[in-house]
Image (cartoon, rainbow, N blue to C red):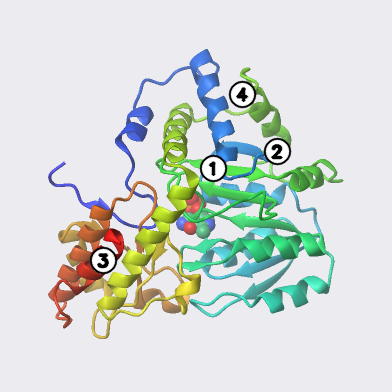
Amino acid sequence: MKDRTLLMIPGPIEFEPAVLAALGAPTTSHVAANFIEVFGQALEMMRKVWLCPAGQPFIMAGSGTLAMDTAVVNLIEPGDKALVISTGYFGERYAELLKRYGAEVTVLGAPPGEVVDLDKIETELKKGSFKLMTFTHVDTSTAVLVDPRPMGKLGRKYGVLTVLDGVCSIAGEEMRQEEWGIDVAFTASQKAIGVPPGLALLVAGPAAMKTWKERKTPVSHYYGDWKNWLPIMEAYEARKPGYFGTPPVNHICALNVSLGQILTEGMEQRFSRHQRIGSAFRAAIGALGLKQVPTDPAHAASTLTAPYYPQGVTGQEFLPKVTAAGAILAGGLLPAIKAAYFRVGHMGAVKPGDILATVGAIETGLAGCGYEFEKGIGVAAAQKILLA
Ligand code: PMP
């Protein structure tokens, strides 16, 4: 594709040709033997990608917000207390969403680019009686990475279910759901999972399933109720047909291909590849003299980078120049700093060459905006890490 422009936003991303071919293949019946096999395999592979052998996977048609929705609506009953650890836009969304279902919500937030102090979280948990705690593994509005390990530990210590929003992390950032004591972890297809937008993907661990089974009131979301979907997931995994709502047949075929590719690469290799690509990209941005939203590289994501524009450069001027040079980037999202920064996604099928091309396009954009820098310094910084 000669005139292809790289899609380097934090989702949707560039997809593998075999995944797109599965999406475009003739649609079979949702109860045909071949599709039952594909659906069953996809569920089995999710446990391996989430590293949660005892988890219950759910595949539903919808976006990441539906996954956010079903993760908590099945666990929360009106009046339950929920703690939201917010590191950006999607944490704020979780607080709104939980209130809609009658939860009593406490939000612990951090200034843009920072994480919430663990002591602060523990102090809040000590006050007691929270039913669940949500956190955003990578907040796509800030590129801030939250370490799930201490969150899982705190959840276990205080008997609080932990819900990990992994929309911008799962299958990119290291995430070991079972070992780290995370009760629910979810994502959407369009990010590191590598399938065009359309699937909400969630794995619930045994404690979350037990809480759901023991609830006293009906789930106040008809479509999202696990009571409707659990028998379907169990049926397909047992290689039997099931019906509640027509499954997105082609999307699930594409998911099956992508999960297979992810497991062929191997989770350890995949985590380290994303780390290397993330460091290379951040090194390039640093070498170009641009600051980043995460205040400390120790909590900067590997799946995306959020650089501030240099003095005198605006997104309106810069982003179209980068697109013309071959890479589509995203503008800011967090309202407080929206006009001051941009975002670059680098996850899933992204190749080292895509990173170099994107850094090159950024250099072209910066030069076109009259920003002074040593030409090629960003590309060289990235290449040094990619080749290490
Ligand atoms: N959580 C995070 C961390 C996200 O990045 C996104 C999407 N960018 C969502 C939730 C919501 O997902 P969707 O847009 O697919 O509804």
Q: Tell me the tag on residue 226.
A: 2
From the top left corner, tell me how far across and down residue 290 is, in percent: 30, 79
Between marks 3 and 4 in the image, the one whose residue lies nearer the viewer? 3
At 58% from the left and 77% from the top, the residue drawn is: 110
Residue 135 position (above or below residue 122): above
Which mark lies nearer to you, 2 or 3? 3
Q: Which of the numbered marks, if any, corresponds to residue 82?
A: none
* Among the two numbered marks 2 and 1 on one chain, the one whose residue lies closer to the N terminus: 1
- 164 w.r.t. 236: above or below: below
Residues tagged 2 and 4 counted as in contact (Cβ below 8 A): no
Residue matched to label 3: 384
Mark 3, other Cα within 10 Å: few <14 / some 14–19 / many ≥20: few
- Categorize mark 2 by other alpha carbons within 10 Å: few (<14), some (14-19), many (20+): many
Along the polypeptide, which appears first: circle 4 or circle 1? 1
Q: Amino acid at mark 2?
A: Trp
Q: Amino acid at mark 4?
A: Tyr
Considering only order in the chain, which callout, 3 or 2, is on the residue closer to the N terminus? 2
**Labels 1 and 3: the sequence-earlier one:** 1
Task: Name the front one of labels 2 and 1.
Answer: 1
Q: Marks 2 and 4, Cα distance to the nearest angstrom?
A: 15 Å
Give the residue at mark 1.
49
**Circle 2: element type:** helix
- Whether 247 is drawn above or below 263: the answer is above
Q: Check disc 3 and give the amino acid type.
A: Lys
> For the residue labelled by badge 4, is the local secondary structure a helix, a strand or a loop?
helix
User: In the depicted view, which residue is nearer to us: 307 or 154?
Assistant: 154
